[in-house]
Image (spheres, rainbow, N blue to C red):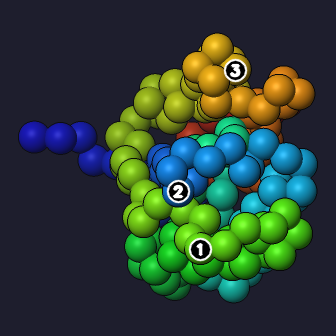
Amino acid sequence: MSASPFHSFLGTPILFLTVQVRCGLPILGDRKALEILRETWLRSAKRDQWLVGLYQIMPDQVNLLACSGPTARPVADWIVVWKATAAVRIKAVMGGRGSLWESGAKQELVRSAAEYAARCSSLQAGPGHPLEAGVGPASGHWGMQWQILPVGMAAGLAVNAT
């Protein structure tokens, strides 16, 4: 029997999501992409009632913690909306054709305060330098992480992002 999910300050479960760029293209390793994703998620809080907490943007994927508001659209619908919104803007600014994202997203429920803290630590620490795996851009700007809202605050687990 699995443990019940850990809840956000809104009383809703916290999800850990991973979204991949199509074919592993390193298009997100640019500050413009970061700004577009951040703006998309900030608007999403009001429009879709989905709140993004700590997140990490790497050149070929996004990892984030999120929770829904009381009248939020289903998570699968929200993911489709923010991915489509961000893709249109990223491709308009940076160029590109076709689909930006792989379909779907890996979704995991955060089951405990300890798991939440571990997810925050892993997002802040990063996965290791992707240049070693040939993923990051030559500039060395390989991953960016910030926090929009500490979604685990209800349990007193606010994590300071750098």
Q: Quadrant of the N terminus?
A: top left
Which quarter of the figure has residue 120?
A: top right
The residue that label 1 is drawn on is 98
Judge left or right: residue 30 versus residue 113: right
Badge 1 crowding class, 10 Å Cα cut-off, few under 14, some 14 to 19, many 20 or more, is: few
In the picture, the disc for residue 22 is 2
What separation in Å lies between label 3 and label 2 (alpha carbons)? 19 Å
Callout 1 secondary element: loop
The residue that label 3 is drawn on is 131
Q: Nearer the viewer, residue 25 or 155?
A: 25
Badge 2 crowding class, 10 Å Cα cut-off, few under 14, some 14 to 19, many 20 or more, is: some
Q: Quadrant of the C terminus?
A: top right
Q: From the viewer's perspective, is residue 60 above or below residue 75?
A: above
In the picture, the disc for residue 26 is none
Front disc: 3 or 1:
1
Which quarter of the figure has residue 98?
A: bottom right
